[in-house]
Image (tube, helix red, strand yellow):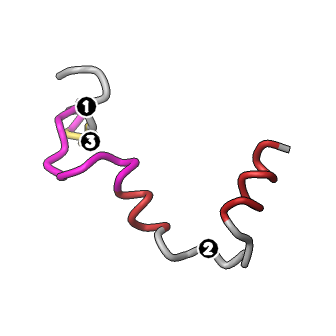
Amino acid sequence: MRANTEVEFQLRGDAVVVRKTGRVGGRGKRLVQAMRGKATTGLSTDEIMALTRG
């Protein structure tokens, strides 16, 4: 496995097995998809950027 490879853990008896996940897309991509359309602040992009840079 390489750095930044998404893995999952399974317990098998007294052992832990680590293997690559079969998911397409990374965790970040799935998080962004899950959050898309959830903002309810009513702020513009410029207002949000001003708050984060504040």
Residue corresponding to mark 1: 5
Q: Amino acid at mark 1?
A: Thr
Q: Amino acid at mark 3?
A: Glu
Q: Residue 52 at what x, y percent from top left?
A: 76, 48
Residue corresponding to mark 3: 8
**Closer-to-camera residue (41/18):** 41
Residue corresponding to mark 2: 39
Q: Residue 27 at what x, y percent from top left?
A: 36, 48
Badge 3 local density, few (<14 within 10 Å), some, or many (20+)? few
Badge 1 local density, few (<14 within 10 Å), some, or many (20+)? few
The answer to whether residue 51 is left or right of residue 15 is right
Q: Residue at x 43, y 57 (%)?
A: 31
Gap between marks 2 and 3 measured at Cα: 30 Å
**Closer-to-camera residue (28/11):** 28
The answer to whether residue 37 is left or right of residue 22 is right
Which tag, 1 or 2, sits closer to the chain's start? 1
Could you tell me if the residues under marks 2 and 3 are in contact, i.e. CB atoms within 8 Å?
no
Gap between marks 3 and 1 measured at Cα: 10 Å
Q: Residue 7 at what x, y percent from top left?
A: 26, 37
**Closer-to-camera residue (15/35):** 35
Q: Amino acid at mark 2?
A: Ala
Circle 3 sits in a helix, a strand or a loop, which is it? strand
